[in-house]
């Protein structure tokens, strides 16, 4: 099974910015990466009137759009899918799955914490594989600066991907 790591943090801490840099660094190292963005509010990627939207409106349980360069699956689900359930669709195509969100999930986590947002963490020491922060926490967890993407990528390579 593909390893899954959740990048979590309070709103405004810089999760998306850090994750974007981490994906670039892992790709630079030849690692195949997937990202799952968790949205508790629901979302819609279809544009009203477009063919895929029309097929979904007609009642299709799944709509796939494909081109020579990318593919998207839009599937009706009856519950908030876990990263493991989503990973089934990605197995064999990627080396690691990073999620943004799922802070209450059971996957190992990298927490992004910025002092101007909060001085408290969301996660316990046991949940964390790394902490990305501009402040010091008294924890036996590897801690990296907000811009130390290379350090986090190396940690993931050694301890998660075993390279």
Image (tube, grey):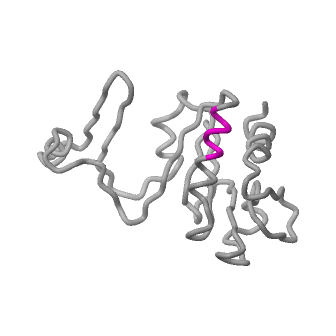
Segment tinted magenta in the rendering: 21-27
Number of marks present in the image shown: 0
Apparent side of residue 49 relative to residue 39 in the rendered image (left or right): left
Q: Is residue 111 above or below residue 88?
A: below
Q: Is residue 113 above or below residue 71?
A: below
Q: Residue furthest top?
A: 68
Q: Position of residue 27 (x, y in %)?
A: 63, 33
Q: Is 157 inside the magenta-drawn segment?
A: no
Q: Give the position of the N terminus as an image quadrant.
A: top right
Residue 70 lies in what quarter of the image?
top left
Q: Give the position of the C terminus as an image quadrant.
A: top right
Q: Position of residue 115 (x, y in %)?
A: 72, 74
Q: Residue at x 73, y 58 (%)?
A: 146
Apparent side of residue 122 relative to residue 135 in the rendered image (left or right): left
Residue 97 lies in what quarter of the image?
top right
Is 126 in front, or is 39?
39
Q: Residue furthest bottom?
A: 119
Q: Residue at x 31, y 45 (%)?
A: 75
Apparent side of residue 147 relative to residue 117 in the rendered image (left or right): right
Q: Main SS of the magenta segment?
A: helix
Q: Position of residue 145 (x, y in %)?
A: 78, 58
Q: Position of residue 49 (x, y in %)?
A: 13, 46
Apparent side of residue 39 relative to residue 105 in the rendered image (left or right): left
Q: Residue at x 69, y 61 (%)?
A: 111
Is 135 in front, or is 161?
135
Is 125 in front, or is 136?
136
């Amino acid at each position: 099974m593909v390893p899954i790591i959740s990048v979590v943090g309070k709103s405004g801490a810089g999760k998306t910015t850090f994750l974007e840099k981490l994906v670039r660094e892992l790709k630079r190292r030849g690692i195949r990466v997937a990202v799952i963005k968790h949205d508790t509010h629901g979302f819609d990627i279809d544009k009203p009137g477009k063919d895929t939207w029309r097929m979904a409106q007609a009642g299709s349980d799944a709509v796939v759009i494909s081109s020579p360069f990318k593919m998207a699956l839009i599937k009706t689900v009856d519950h908030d899918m876990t990263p493991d359930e989503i990973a089934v669709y990605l197995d064999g195509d990627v080396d690691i799955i990073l999620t943004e969100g799922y802070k209450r999930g059971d996957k190992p986590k990298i927490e992004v914490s910025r002092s101007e947002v909060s001085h408290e963490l969301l996660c316990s020491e046991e949940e964390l594989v790394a902490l990305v922060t501009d402040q010091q926490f008294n924890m036996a967890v590897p801690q990296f600066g907000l811009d130390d993407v290379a350090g986090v990528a190396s940690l993931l390579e050694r301890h998660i991907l075993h390279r």
